[in-house]
Image: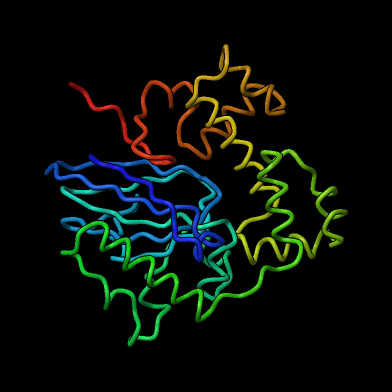
């Protein structure tokens, strides 16, 4: 299995955090677990028999997914290639002219958003090389920027930046004062542009901070992660971690193999 992460061209950097590719030639079924990371994304999947979600539903060939509020699973029956774009938290409304909360915990066939004459699925070449496919995806997103990009919503970008910079440890009251928005207005704008509430986004940021330290083994004992990130106690941290990663921190260490950031598969025996 081969993974790559690629920086986007400068005009896409306000919208795309990075492009990525993941592919395998192995003719074996695989199951992967996705982890809540606070970001929507675009995925072009090419797999024998398609990629199925936890309910057995086959993914569209090209899909736009929204915020995930919990861990999930996907299943692949054999060789596959995925080419994706990890978007910034509020990029989906700017690029696709929709409300972010319409996509929360779900995905949408990208072909349903496009004029048939310029639909992405009409221009993608599954036989192209990976660099060529990345170029096709970049060209499509650049066209979306030119056609539908909207200015940032006042207050939301500031709130996002503060939540990310503090790893979710800034109060809603502080955000209201800094953005000069009422609680209701901040909640509504954040929900529309990011897809979830500021409070839930803060919880995901805090969880991701502990996950980062877990990956780097920058702790003496697991209970340190809870206290360093202001969880009430270790049990609260474990519940939150399980909600967003599908496993407890200890299980994550011993039972999961990280394929790429925020995507794991069970350790394979033998």
Q: Residue furthest left?
A: 27
Task: Answer with left or right where residue 242 lies relative to residue 124.
Answer: right
The colour scheme used here is: rainbow
What residue is rendered at 14% in x and 41% in y? 28
- Closer-to-camera residue (154/33): 154
Compared to residue 119, the image places residue 182 above or below, namely above
x, y percent for residue 175: 81, 51
x, y percent for residue 182: 85, 61
- Closer-to-camera residue (7/81): 7
Task: Answer with left or right where residue 43 lies relative to residue 25.
Answer: right
How many discs mark residues in the rendered view? Answer: 0
In the rendered image, which quarter contains the C terminus? top left
What residue is rendered at 88% in x and 54% in y? 177
For residue 255, what is the image quadrant?
top left
x, y percent for residue 261: 42, 40
Q: Residue furthest top?
A: 220
What residue is rendered at 57% in x and 70% in y? 93
Task: Answer with left or right where residue 50 lies relative to residue 26.
Answer: right
Compared to residue 218, the image places residue 186 above or below, namely below
x, y percent for residue 98: 55, 74
What residue is rendered at 58% in x and 31% in y? 239
Task: Answer with left or right where residue 123 lies relative to residue 237.
Answer: left
Compared to residue 216, the image places residue 21 above or below, namely below
In the rendered image, which quarter contains the N terminus? top left
């Amino acid at each position: 299995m081969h993974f790559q992460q690629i920086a986007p061209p400068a005009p896409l950097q306000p919208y795309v955090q990075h492009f990525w590719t993941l592919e395998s030639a192995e003719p074996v079924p695989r199951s992967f677990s996705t982890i809540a990371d606070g970001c929507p994304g675009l995925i072009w999947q090419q797999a024998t028999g398609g990629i199925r979600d936890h309910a057995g539903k086959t993914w569209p060939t090209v899909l736009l997914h929204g915020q995930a509020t919990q861990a999930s699973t996907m299943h692949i029956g054999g060789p596959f290639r995925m080419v994706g774009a990890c978007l910034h938290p509020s990029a989906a409304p700017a690029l696709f002219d929709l409300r972010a909360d319409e996509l929360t915990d779900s995905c949408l066939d990208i072909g349903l958003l496009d004029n048939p004459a310029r639909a992405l699925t009409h221009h993608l070449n599954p036989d192209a090389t990976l660099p060529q496919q990345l170029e096709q995806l970049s060209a499509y997103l650049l066209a979306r920027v030119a056609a539908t990009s909207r200015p940032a919503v006042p207050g939301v970008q500031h709130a996002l930046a503060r939540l990310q910079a503090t790893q979710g440890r800034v109060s809603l009251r502080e955000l209201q004062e800094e953005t000069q928005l009422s609680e209701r207005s901040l909640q509504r704008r954040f929900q529309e542009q990011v897809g979830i509430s500021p409070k839930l986004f803060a919880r995901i940021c805090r969880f991701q901070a502990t996950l980062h330290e877990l990956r780097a083994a920058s702790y003496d004992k697991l209970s340190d992660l809870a206290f360093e990130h202001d969880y009430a106690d270790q049990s609260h941290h474990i519940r939150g971690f399980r909600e967003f990663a599908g496993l407890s921190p200890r299980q994550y260490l011993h039972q999961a193999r990280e394929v790429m950031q925020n995507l794991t598969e069970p350790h394979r025996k033998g």
